[in-house]
Amino acid sequence: MRPTGTTRRGALTATGAAALAAVLAGCGDGAGGEAGSGRSGAAATAARAAAVRAEKRIRTAAARTSLELLGRYERVAGAHPSAAAALAPLREAVRAHAEALAPSGGRAAGAAPSPAPPDDARAAVKELAAAERRASDTHLAALVDAPPELARLLASVAAADAAHAFLLTGIAKEVSS
């Protein structure tokens, strides 16, 4: 015969179900315009417009950061042909990041010209690694204000930038001066 009353398994199941219900109840579309949300239609529209403007601003700045980094890659590859082949896959990844970050999925606006790379190929690749670290930090800092979907993209790009910095450190050791 089965014991009556509350069992440990039953209590854990009920607790898990209650927690799941609480999480699901908190998941909305985030629009704030639902009935009973306390916002008027005009306020909700203004809030959505402000969110769109903020996302565009964050995307534009992030795309500009990636474009500046792409410019550095191109300058280093042009000045140091011995490093160009090793830099090509990383440069293409940075190009893809700039396109993904561009507002409305289009091409990002041009970035400021990058400084001339050092004459030494190793030093140029090391500077490129430092630029990747700075770009990663910039993308991470933008996460705070970004909406969830853009935050995931920025986190991925920041992680890729950090990985590129690590790879560039190895390339710098192998490249001939």
Image (cartoon, rainbow, N blue to C red):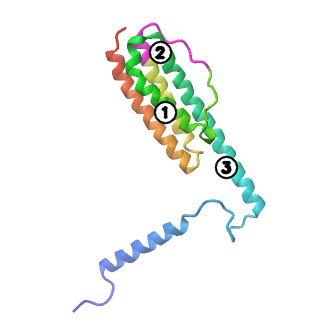
Dot 2 falls on a residue whose secondary structure is: helix
Residue at the left extreme, as displayed: 1
Q: Position of residue 14 (x, y in %)?
A: 39, 77
Name the front one of labels 2 and 3. Answer: 2
Q: Which mark is residue 76?
A: 2
**Quadrant location of residue 170?**
top left
Location of mark 3 (residue): 51
Q: Residue 121 sits in which quadrant?
A: top left
In the rendered view, would you say 32 is above or below 169? below
Residue 146 against residue 116 in the figure, above or below: below
The Cα atoms of the two marked residues, 1 and 2, are separated by 19 Å
Going by the picture, which residue comes out furthest to the front? 106
Foreground pick, 79 / 114? 79
Q: Is tag 1's residue or tag 2's residue first in the polypeptide sequence?
A: 2
Left or right of 169? Residue 64 is right
Q: Where does residue 167 sit, x and y in percent of width and height?
A: 36, 26
**Relative to residue 46, is residue 157 drawn left or right?**
left
Report the magenta stretch's main SS: loop
Q: Which residue is mark 1?
A: 136
Q: Amino acid at mark 3?
A: Ala
Instruction: Tell me the distance, in whole angstroms, between the alpha carbons under discs 1 and 3.
Output: 24 Å
**Which span of residues is magenta-colored?**
113-125
**Tag 1, which secondary structure?**
helix
Helix, strand or loop under label 3: helix
- Which residue: 51% across, 20% down? 72
Q: Residues within 10 Å of mark 1 (few under 14, many from 20)?
A: many
Q: Residue at x 59, y 61 (%)?
A: 29
Quarter of the image for the C terminus: give it.
Answer: top left
Near mark 3 (Cα within 10 A), the count class, few <14, some 14-19 or many ≥20, is some
- Residue type, mark 1 in image: Ser
Q: Is residue 101 above or below residue 39?
A: above
Upstream in sequence: badge 1 or badge 3: 3
